[in-house]
Amino acid sequence: MEQQTEKKKVVFSAIQPSGTITLGNYLGAIKNWAAMQEEFSCIYALADLHTITVRQEAAAFRKNIIDAYASILACGIDTEKSLFFIQSHVNTHAQLAWVLDCYTQFGELSRMTQFKDKSAKHADNVNAGLFTYPTLMVADILLYQADMVPVGADQKQHVELTRNIAERFNGLYGNVFKVPEPYIPKNGARVMSLQDPTKKMSKSDENVNACVNLMDSPEVIMKKFKRAVTDSEAKVRYAEGKEGINNLMAIYSAVTGLSFEQIEHDFDGKGYGDFKTAVGEAVIEELRPIREKYEQYIADKAYMQDCYKKAGEIAQKISQRTLDKAMKKVGFVLK
Ligand code: ATP
Ligand code: LTN
């Protein structure tokens, strides 16, 4: 009997080009993006349409988009294996988002914690885009019939909304969208601030020591880890109330692959100074090749332009099929 080649599962994810990429973004999401390329059919995007929910200065925004594209290539996203495009180059995203807005309830969007956080943080600009942003993310994912969405823990609620909207739409019109699963790493799903380990590490933190950026120099990375807030017990162990050490252990584990038990064993009898140095060194070595590759990509804008143009054209074709299918079901007359 003829063997049927099994179709690869589709992976979709995106990141906002809203500033320098952090160790949190890397361990929570992008490291997995790279790892998944071997086994799955991967589609990744720079979610630039999402970024203007917070006001951007045009020149800085443009630079952040190109920087983020180079950084993500440097993290190992291989354009021969994966599609990596810029969201605003593909017009189906905003179109499907509009359709899905009309199948999303005001109450559902009001419950999104990221909306509540961001509207508190940017109280002077609680715009309609900030409110409806999750449906744009839903459209991003559903357009590619994704099976899996690798994200950090903070995006889980949005992937759940995606599942709810897909099921609702399918319930009305038949099998239009694949219902995706979130894919959240065991370690690194929620990297915390080095200065306040009860808060997530965020690129928009005002305290520069709170956050490690992918392009920080080795000296800066070491300094940030040495200054990381810990506790007074002076024992490397994972426990409640030791958020600073728990966070350093999670980072160390995500980078080295060592289990918490192994880390506790290796640092038994050693002080926090030794442990912080070890974490700093491990992160420096993990990020060193990324920084070097970033320098190569950022110096070759023509190469990057070629990559995102080609990827955008393919993404347009793939996503148009889903958009047409959805619009037809709703009753629109297609061209
Ligand atoms: P901002 O601080 O501007 O809200 P951000 O740093 O949260 O931005 P995003 O672009 O919103 O970055 O997130 C990109 C990806 O990185 C998402 O999958 C998100 O879940 C993940 N991520 C962001 N911060 C962390 C973190 N501290 N730990 C683990 N994953 C994270
Ligand atoms: N909303 C996400 C970025 C994002 C995304 C997506 C993630 C936009 N579209 C689709 C996964 C799938 C964020 O702010 N981190």
Image (cartoon, grey):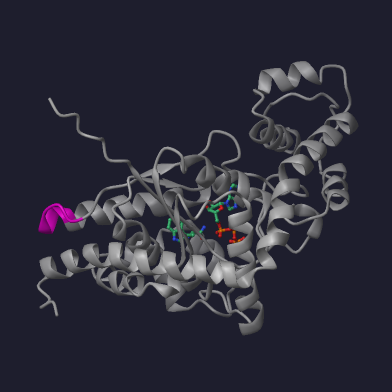
Number of residue marks: 0
- Location of the N terminus by quadrant is top left
- Residue 65 visible, this orientation: no
Q: Position of residue 223 (x, y in %)?
A: 88, 48
Front residue of 316/47: it is 316
In reply to whether residue 163 is colored magenta, the answer given is no
Q: Quadrant of residue 314?
A: bottom left
Q: Quadrant of residue 5?
A: top left
The residue that appears at 61% across and 83% down in the rendered structure is: 58
* Residue 36 spot, x, y in % from top left: 47, 41
Q: Quadrant of the C terminus?
A: bottom left
One can see residue 330 in this view: yes
Q: Residue at x 58, y 64 (%)?
A: 69
Q: Is residue 175 magenta?
A: yes
Residues in magenta, as a range: 170-176
What residue sits 69% from the left and 26% below the top? 238
Q: In the image shown, does 98 or 80 lie closer to the viewer?
A: 80
Task: Return the x and y of residue 244 as percentages of the image width and height.
Answer: 75, 38
Judged from this view, the residue extending furthest toward the bottom is: 58
**What's the residue at 78%, 43% (across, down)?**
284
The answer to which of 323 and 232 lies nearer the viewer is: 323
